[in-house]
Amino acid sequence: MKLYFKIPQKLKTYFDKEITLYQQAFNDGELQVAWRHLERAHILGQAYPFEHSYAHWLMLRFGIRIKSIKETVGQIPRLLVGGVKSFVGIIPVGNTGGSNVPPLKTMEIPEDLKEILLLHSGL
């Protein structure tokens, strides 16, 4: 079993870019665009405990800020166990992380993110 601790720096650059784009879109009131960037950040960071947990933390905050009970409640267990699952390498690849999808469902990764992950993840 491989344990994952730290996201490779090149991949972190892409993760951080999605977080920045999320924040910009949210501040501009573009909630659907903002959410999509959170999902993309989740996909990029889900193999790494800190980034995975951080994506879920932001999703929880998003749920609170838009007053979505479903998203807020759905993020709590994901936040509690997501990072642990990353640490031991048990993740549903491509899962977008929102409460609108089952937490263990593997999903298709968008082509541009697939390329980034292949080039920069070290997995």
Image (spheres, rainbow, N blue to C red):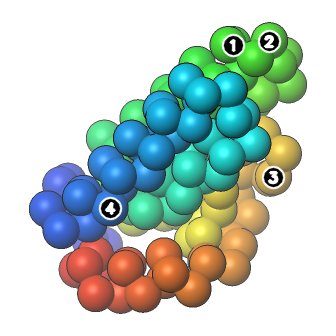
Q: CA distance from mark 1 to mark 3?
A: 18 Å
Identify which residue is drawn at 48% across, 34% down: 24
Identify which residue is drawn at 77% across, 28% down: 71
Q: Name which residue type carries label 1.
A: Ile
Identify which residue is drawn at 55% across, 24% down: 27
Comes first in the chain, label 3 or label 4: 4
Comes first in the chain, label 3 or label 2: 2
Residue that badge 1 annotates: 64
Comes first in the chain, label 4 or label 2: 4
Q: Name which residue type carries label 3.
A: Val
Frontmost residue, 32 versus 121: 32
Residue that badge 2 annotates: 67
Residue that badge 3 annotates: 101
Relative to 66, say whether 88 is above or below. below
Comes first in the chain, label 1 or label 4: 4
Identify which residue is drawn at 28% across, 75% down: 121
Q: Residues within 10 Å of mark 3 (few under 14, many from 20)?
A: few
Q: Is residue 73 visible?
A: no
Location of the C terminus (image quadrant) = bottom left
Q: CA distance from mark 3 to mark 4?
A: 23 Å
Frontmost residue, 71 versus 32: 32
The residue mark sitting in front, 3 or 4, is: 4
